[in-house]
Image: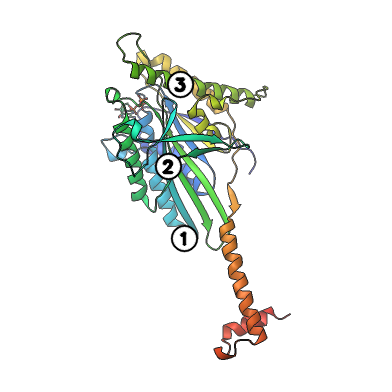
């Protein structure tokens, strides 16, 4: 597939129900992931504007389920409809707190504080591909198993967050659904990643009356969002034909983790969450301006399809076994096995020129 407009920005009106946001924003990304295209949806907006509500959902009503649980449902419902294909689904859940990565899905440990979570490190290969060290990936065989992983990750996130800031996210979180699919009997495999991202919002920090931890958290959140803006500005300028050979992904762990989403092989959608209150107007306008910039960025979306070597080896071994069997039959080496079956006769006739 050729270059596509890869990043789009959507402003979610506050009263729009999560079901509409899902249908408009996430269903196309889910369907793309089922067909081998990477997708990312990230929510961006000021603190308290509804990012977590949009991505994870509201805690009180079933109808308030966010993009993550709805995407999980949609993926497994789609799998059950495609009888001619085989799928495997894995889940990972990364938290970025104070510019450090943590694995939210470490089922082995009892989590009481952030330090109990396994630290995750990012690596970059020569070709620029970003990889994770220590980020666990769990297979989910059905919707319930995937939702349990989401629940485990969200519980670990809540437990490990600083108690004085319960109402506000102090970290960025990336919930990734890894989908692998192939047509039954074929060696071609399609692999895709769907990243569902809940970013922390800009923090206003009063000069006095704030403890050091809150101050430090706010500094890291604001810095990473500033670096995100720099990446988007550089990508936008590049899209406009300006000479921007260097895109500053490496400045923060969040922009590195989202490198592919912000400038690579990924269909990315930003959901801008805004608050209509008068005293939030400046920040709402700033969010909309950022959305405009994001909408101008172009990614190149490719079908992630390759021959699976292990499947090919298995198939070739099977072919070799069958050919050996045929040679034995042709040589008449199997005297003790009784007369040929009709099926063997047909196969032998087929091999004669
Ligand atoms: N569309 C909505 N309908 C109903 N309630 C909402 C909606 N959006 C947000 N809320 C409520 O507003 C509050 C703040 O929302 P939320 O926690 O999602 O904000 P946030 O942008 O993630 O904030 P932060 O960046 O501080 O984590 C929550 O109590 C949430 O349930």
| Residue in view at x 33 percent, y 46 percent | 148
Quadrant containing the C terminus in the rendered view:
bottom right
Mark 3 touching mark 2, by CB under 8 A?
no
Find numbered disc 2 in the image and state the secondary structure of the residue it sits on: strand
Residue that protrudes farthest toward the top in the picture: 208
Q: CA distance from mark 1 to mark 2?
A: 26 Å
Find numbered disc 3 in the image and state the secondary structure of the residue it sits on: helix
Q: Is residue 352 above or below residue 167?
A: below
- The mark that comes first in sequence, 1 or 2, is 1
Disc on res. 83? 1
Mark 3 touching mark 1, by CB under 8 A?
no
What colour scheme does the image use?
rainbow
Disc on res. 175? none
Q: Is residue 106 above or below residue 339?
A: above
Task: Read off the residue under disc 2.
Answer: 92
| Residue in view at x 33 percent, y 25 percent | 168
In terms of image quarters, where does ligand 1 lie? top left
Q: Position of residue 303 (x, y in %)?
A: 59, 46
Q: CA distance from mark 3 to mark 1?
A: 43 Å
Q: CA distance from mark 3 to mark 2?
A: 28 Å
Which label lies toward us, 1 or 2? 2
Give whichever of 277, 76 is nearer the camera. Answer: 76
Which label lies toward us, 3 or 2? 2
Task: Read off the residue under disc 3.
Answer: 287
Quarter location, residue 296: top right
């Amino acid at each position: 597939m050729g270059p596509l407009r890869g990043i789009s920005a959507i402003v979610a009106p506050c009263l729009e129900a999560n079901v509409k946001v899902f249908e408009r924003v996430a269903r196309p990304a889910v369907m793309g992931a089922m067909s081998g295209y990477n997708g990312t949806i990230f929510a961006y907006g000021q603190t308290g504007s509804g990012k977590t509500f949009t991505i994870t959902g509201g805690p009180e009503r079933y109808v308030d389920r966010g993009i993550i649980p709805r995407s999980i449902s949609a993926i497994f419902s789609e799998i059950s409809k495609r009888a001619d294909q085989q799928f495997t689904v894995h889940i990972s859940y990364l938290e970025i707190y104070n510019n450090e990565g943590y694995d939210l899905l470490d089922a082995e440990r009892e989590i009481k504080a952030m330090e109990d979570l396994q630290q995750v490190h990012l690596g970059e290969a020569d070709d620029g591909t970003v990889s994770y060290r220590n980020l666990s990936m769990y297979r989910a065989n059905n919707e319930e198993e995937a939702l349990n992983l989401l629940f485990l990750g969200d519980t670990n996130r809540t437990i490990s967050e600083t108690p004085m800031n319960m109402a506000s996210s102090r970290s960025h979180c990336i919930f990734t659904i890894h989908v692998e699919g192939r047509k039954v009997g074929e060696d071609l495999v399609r692999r895709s990643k769907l990243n569902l991202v809940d970013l922390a919002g800009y923090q206003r920090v009063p000069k006095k009356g704030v403890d050091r931890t809150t101050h430090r958290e706010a500094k890291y959140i604001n810095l990473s969002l500033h670096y995100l803006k720099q990446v988007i500005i550089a990508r936008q300028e590049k899209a406009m034909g300006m000479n921007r050979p260097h895109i500053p992904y490496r400045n923060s762990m969040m922009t590195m983790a989202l490198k592919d989403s912000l400038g690579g092989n990924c269909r990315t959608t930003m959901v801008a969450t805004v608050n209509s209150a008068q005293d939030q107007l400046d920040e709402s306008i700033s969010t909309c301006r950022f959305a405009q910039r994001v909408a101008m960025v172009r990614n190149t979306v490719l079908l992630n399809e390759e021959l699976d070597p292990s499947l090919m080896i298995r198939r070739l071994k099977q072919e070799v076994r069958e050919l050996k069997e045929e040679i034995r039959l042709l040589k008449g080496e199997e005297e003790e096995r009784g007369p040929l079956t009709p099926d063997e006769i047909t196969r032998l006739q087929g091999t004669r020129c």
